Amino acid sequence: MKLNFKTICFGALAACTFTACDLDTAPTTSLDADAVYKNTENADRVMRGVWNYIFNSGSTYASIGYGAIMMNDDFAGSDVVRTTSYGYSSSYNLTNGYGRGEINDVMWDMVYDPINNCNAVLANIDNIEGEQTEKDRIKGQAYATRGFLYMLLASHYSFAIDKDPNAVCVPIYTEPTSYDMAVTGKPASSVSEVYAQALADLKAGYDLIPTDYNRGSNATDQYKIDHTVVTGLLARTSLYAREWQDAYNYADEAMNLKNRYLMSETEYKSGFNNALNQEWMWGYSCTIDDNLPAYNFHFKDSTTPGSGYSCLNVDPYFKELFDDNDYRKGMFFWGPNAGYGEWTMLSSKFKFADVDNMLADIVMMRVAEMYLIKAEAAAHLPGKTSEAQSLLKELRDARMKPGYTAAEITATGDDLLKEIWLERRKELWGEGFALTDIIRNQQPVERKTWQHFVECTYNEHEDGSVTDKTPIVTETGDVIFADDKDEAYQSKYCVILQGHSTVKLPDGTDFVPNSKYYLFRITEQEELQNLNLYNDHPKLDIYR
């Protein structure tokens, strides 16, 4: 396995990173900007470096780039059970964001360093050598990347936009950082302003990236933002910003650009590890020489022998949310995980493509999300209830076993929205949406205790002792409860299996909507160094 954290120099970019006065993290080498931005080929290299940093930056093996942010968000939600192996304990316990744990710090650097580099591209691209179509494409990708990153910030560092559109969020930078700006810092903008910046950037990318731009058929190029990706990002960001008509329109366009394709059962069960999957709109592909992002699969892959930590497992109650004829239900089953051998409810959704060489691709966007975005937007738009119901049923039908169809959907209003949100949980499990959905919909985390004695196979010896107790797993991946047996039988012949181990907030109170523990918190270093941080919008009361 090739495991090396990289200090990435993008060339001649800003002399400082974006943590106000944090001068000691500047690139170790730098060139004059005129040399870096001589032509479109060099500018394109900068954008490749941006995405390399987004996926490879980090401080530990449990905090590698954007893939770790997505996993943090799922561990912090309702439907992932963390076993006791290495990684993501603070995410699962919801102490990471508020307590400024490692994922929080990684997020800040992972976002603002690339934003600064996008700003440098945008500041120089019009004056370099090269074809205008190439300049437009690179410029559009820089705008779209910056918009994506501001969307990440808006959806993690503030509550839902409709809770308080003027609440403080994070600083917005649209020009390369000068020395003076790096020393003083900019005031934080409101959540509505950060979403507005994200949408403006994405729309600029939408206009500039040629519709006929083809990133090619190589898996390693599928991270590049083409017209379909920027359309999908506009749909996602419009949904988060509660711009329902735009979310509806962009999701519809993105679906049609991909011919409304939804994976077959065989494709869905193939491991979510291939960026060339026909339903994937956007993905990051790893190679033997650049496989660090795939290290995340050691946490996600609970069934492949040789997978390391396998701590992203399933709440048993979550399995019961699926129809019996939904083939996704069979992907959750009891067993010992591949990493530490802990008995838990496993998922076969994520599998290494090549565990020996640590290869697997990271999904960032697919067509099913567009169905769900369009359905949710339609549910909010006058006269489109029946369309929202049809879209939801079409997706559910695609996930049914051969010969079966999903039940008709008759819910309306808030009940229909709850159905759509539930389907997002089921369809996008493990893909990084759990925490942002909880925040934007002003919902609580939902966890409750699951703990049962279960029947086992065993070896009973002449002296009456029992060894080698192994839970019995049925053909459907379930276990046989023994809760009704007497204590002596349970103690001798059974074992206890459990689901969630954390069912309260860190302060011991029940989960509630809009908890401070759901948010990422501006880093302490930024608060100490950025003297202008709260000039325009006051610090949230929950942090005082």
Image (cartoon, rainbow, N blue to C red):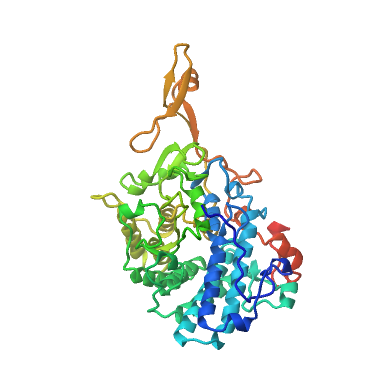
**Residue 210 visible in rendering:** yes
The spot of residue 157 in percent (x, y) is 61, 62
* Residue 319 position within the rendered picture, expressed as x and y whole percent measured from the top left: 41, 44
Instruction: Tell me if 100 is positioned left or right of 418 in this view.
Output: right
Name, please, the residue furthest toward the top. Answer: 463
- Viewer-side residue, 409 vs 74: 74
Q: Residue at x 76, y 70 (%)?
A: 531
Please indicate, yes or no, whether residue 442 appears anywhere in the rendered image.
no
Q: Relative to 203, say whether 307 is above or below.
A: above
Quarter-of-image position of residue 373? bottom left
- From this view, report whether residue 103 is shown above or below residue 194: above
Residue 221 in percent (x, y) is at: 44, 68
User: Residue 335 location in percent, x, y?
Assistant: 43, 37
Q: Which residue, as the protein is rendered here, is positioned at the far left?
A: 403
- All told, the count of numbered labels is 0
> Above or below — where is 539 with respect to 174?
above
Q: Nearer the viewer, residue 380 or 94?
A: 94
Q: Quadrant of residue 104?
A: bottom right
Residue at 43% across, 43% down: 303
Task: Work out which quarter of the rendered image holds the C terminus and state it.
Answer: bottom right
